[in-house]
Amino acid sequence: MKRLFLIRHAKSSWKHRGLRDHDRPLNGRGRGQLELMRDVVQAQGALDGPVFCSTARRARLTVEGLLAGAVQPRVEFDSRLYTFDYRDLLDWLGQRDEDRITLVGHNPAFEDLVDHLLPDAPGHLPTCAFVHLELPADNWNDGDKKPGRLLCFTTPKDLLGKCRNQVILS
């Protein structure tokens, strides 16, 4: 079995129009999303193995924000993960031998990858969405031959609703 954790980068800023897409930072909402998602990502074990991240600034800042207070995993930044095409991700995964991988990157590549691997994909992956998949395969090249299983799908909006309910109920 293979375990794949996908974390879409947190909400980025469009404030500085002169910046290249690759250089855009997170905005305040994005930093807040990381606060909400940190415990879920850590509890699911996404940071217990190797973490591979797009070289885009917003993705790097997402990893840094999620790692606050965690045991520091091996994090590698790879320019090939700055992609918007899921087939690039499938090719990249096909070159790996780890049993569990965490990717931090971008849509539409992540959304399309999940659609490709799951029979009943959750649909849209908003910023800072977290997906935990299990794939019935011995190697990553076979990961898309049998349907995977969704173990967790969480968004900041899901957690924000729970936090609000906790405040109301207490």
Image (cartoon, rainbow, N blue to C red):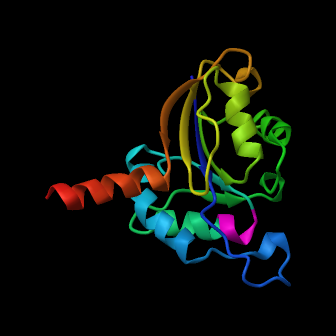
Q: Observer-nearest residue: 135 or 150? A: 150
Residue ID at (48%, 62%): 72
Across and down, in percent, residue 94 comes to: 78, 32
Horizontal arrangement in the rendering, residue 151 relative to residue 79 (left or right): left
Above or below, 46 relative to 97:
below
Check the picture and name the quadrant holding the N terminus.
top right
Q: Observer-nearest residue: 28 or 69? A: 28
Above or below, 141 relative to 71:
above
Total tally of numbered discs in the picture: 0
Across and down, in percent, residue 110 comes to: 71, 44
Across and down, in percent, residue 3 comes to: 56, 33
Magenta stretch? 55-59
Residue ID at (79%, 35%): 90
Quadrant in which residue 114 is drawn: top right
The answer to whether residue 57 is magenta is yes
Above or below, 64 relative to 136:
below
Residue ID at (39%, 53%): 159
Query: Magenta-highlighted stretch: main secondary structure?
Result: helix
Residue ID at (57%, 63%): 63
Above or below, 2 relative to 29:
above
Check the picture and name the quadrant holding the C terminus.
bottom left
